[in-house]
Image (spheres, grey):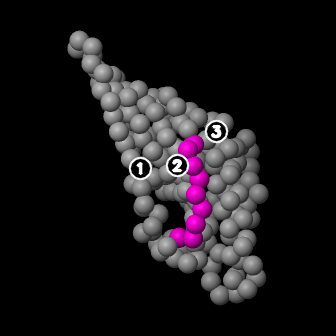
Amino acid sequence: MALNLVSLLSTTSALIKRNNTTTSGYNISSSLKKQVQAVYIGAEGMHNGCQIPYERFPVVFVELGQKSEHIHRMGNYANRDVELYLHFVGMISYGMGSAEEAGGRENAHVECIRLMGNIEYMLRNKVTLSATVQICEVESTTYNVDRESIYNIVGDITAKVTITDTD
């Protein structure tokens, strides 16, 4: 079965969307002021160039990072071990103007930390991204201010995914 990266991203995005409800055991919007409004998929860094209206925040991006393969051959059969990195990027906007004076920046940082904690909790406890994924390990989480917009706070979870694929 050939590895379909777009399918993996779509399945992972669907997992995030399914767990964005109050009835989900892993509600990624738990303790946030507003539910996650959208989930986007793409290549690493996609979130840097997206123009998102203020009312569409918070958002989550599932981005495909580095991928490496190792192929094992035995007769007419081949297995390949694929390691790839998925980035789960959460973005919170605190707007501009009076939001700054009302503690908007601090609140947005706290919201981002909560959102990323909720996503990390879900990934650590619900590792079935697809039938072919063997392992999904959260490796790191970083937080910063989006360099493209001073009004966005960004969290980035890096997860290593291991897949054994048969060609």
Asked if labels 3 and 2 touch by Cβ distance under 8 angstroms, the answer is no
Stretch of the chain drawn in magenta:
138-146
The Cα–Cα distance between marks 2 and 3, rounded to whole angstroms, is: 12 Å
Q: Report the residue at 68% width, 70% height from top.
A: 108
Q: Quadrant of the C terminus?
A: top left
Dot 1: what SS? strand
Position in image of residue 98 (x %, y %): 70, 87
Q: First in sequence, mark 1 or 3: give its number.
A: 1
The Cα–Cα distance between marks 1 and 3, rounded to whole angstroms, is: 19 Å
Q: First in sequence, mark 2 or 1: give its number.
A: 1
Q: Residue furthest top?
A: 75
Q: Which mark is residue 124?
A: 3
Name the kind of residue labelled 2 in the image. Thr
Dot 2: what SS? strand
Q: Quadrant of the N terminus?
A: top left
Position in image of residue 121 (x %, y %): 68, 44
Task: Mark 2: give few (<14), some (14-19) or many (20+) Cα within 10 Å.
Answer: many
Q: Is residue 141 in the magenta section? A: yes
Q: Is residue 156 left or right of residue 105?
A: left
Task: Mark 1: give few (<14), some (14-19) or many (20+) Cα within 10 Å.
Answer: some
Asked if labels 1 and 2 touch by Cβ distance under 8 angstroms, the answer is yes
Q: Which mark is residue 65?
A: 1
The Cα–Cα distance between marks 2 and 1, rounded to whole angstroms, is: 9 Å
Name the kind of residue labelled 1 in the image. Gly
Q: Name the quadrant containing residue 81.
A: top left
Q: Report the residue at 38% width, 47% height from top.
A: 66
Q: Is residue 115 in the magenta section? A: no
Q: Report the residue at 51% width, 56% height from top.
A: 61
Name the kind of residue labelled 3 in the image. Arg
Q: Is residue 20 visible?
A: no
Q: Main secondary structure of the magenta part?
A: strand
Q: Which residue position is annotated with label 2?
A: 158
